[in-house]
Image (cartoon, rainbow, N blue to C red):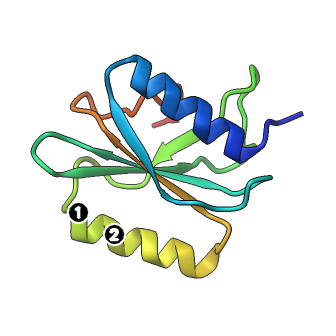
């Protein structure tokens, strides 16, 4: 059984804090099963956007699966527009922002 999105978001942000990263909930979505977009912000201000990977939401060991929605670091305005388009389709969507120069936001299961 998958954990509720609100619990996953809270735990992931705590994991980020424990690793020395800062992060915030930019948009609170549905507590039970909302999808999650993660904006990873680098020191230069450019942003990588990660969203749910196609297929099952979780991998074989229960980690949420993500994929890069931007080819690499992108202009923040372009990423904001991508988020707006997603919100128009999915009003239950969560958006979290993580400051991370490494660029992965501590996301474990990233599909390339």
**Residue found 38% across the figure and 17% down from its top:** 19
Residue 93: horizontal and vertical position, in percent? 61, 63
- Residue 29's quadrant in the figure? bottom right
Q: Is residue 35 above or below residue 40?
A: below
Front residue of 106 and 70: 106
- Quadrant of the snapshot with the N terminus: top right
Front residue of 66 and 45: 45
**Residue found 51% across the figure and 27% down from its top:** 14
**Residue found 74% across the figure and 54% down from its top:** 31
State the residue position of label 1: 76
Q: How many marks?
A: 2
Considering the numbered disc 2 on the image, is that residue within a helix, a strand or a loop?
Answer: helix
User: Are the residues tagged 2 and 1 within 8 Å (C-beta)?
Assistant: yes
- Quadrant of the snapshot with the C terminus: top left
Q: Residue furthest bottom?
A: 88
Considering the numbered disc 1 on the image, is that residue within a helix, a strand or a loop?
Answer: helix
Horizontally, is 82 left or right of 31 in the view? Answer: left
Residue 22: horizontal and vertical position, in percent? 33, 35
Q: Is residue 97 above or below residue 77?
A: above
- Residue 62's quadrant in the figure? top right
**Residue found 9% across the figure and 45% down from its top:** 44
- Residue 102's quadrant in the figure? top left
Q: Residue furthest right?
A: 1
Q: Is residue 3 above or below residue 88?
A: above
Residue 80's label in the rendered image is 2
Front residue of 91 and 73: 91
Front residue of 40 and 16: 16
The Cα–Cα distance between marks 2 and 1, rounded to whole angstroms, is 6 Å
How many residues crowd around disc 2 within 10 Å: few (fewer than 14), some, or many (20 or more)? Answer: some
Residue 83: horizontal and vertical position, in percent? 44, 68
Horizontally, is 7 left or right of 2 in the view? Answer: left
How many residues crowd around disc 1 within 10 Å: few (fewer than 14), some, or many (20 or more)? Answer: some
């Amino acid at each position: 059984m998958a954990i509720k999105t609100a619990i996953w978001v809270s735990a992931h942000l705590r994991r980020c804090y424990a690793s020395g990263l800062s992060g915030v909930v930019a948009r609170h979505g549905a507590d039970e099963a909302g999808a999650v977009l993660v904006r990873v912000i680098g020191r230069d201000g450019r942003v990588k956007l990660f969203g749910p990977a196609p297929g099952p939401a979780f991998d074989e060991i229960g980690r949420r699966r993500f994929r890069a929605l931007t080819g690499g670091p992108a202009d923040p305005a372009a990423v904001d527009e991508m988020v707006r388009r997603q919100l128009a389709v999915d009003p239950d969507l969560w958006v979290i922002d993580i400051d991370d120069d490494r660029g992965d936001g501590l996301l474990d299961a990233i599909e390339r």
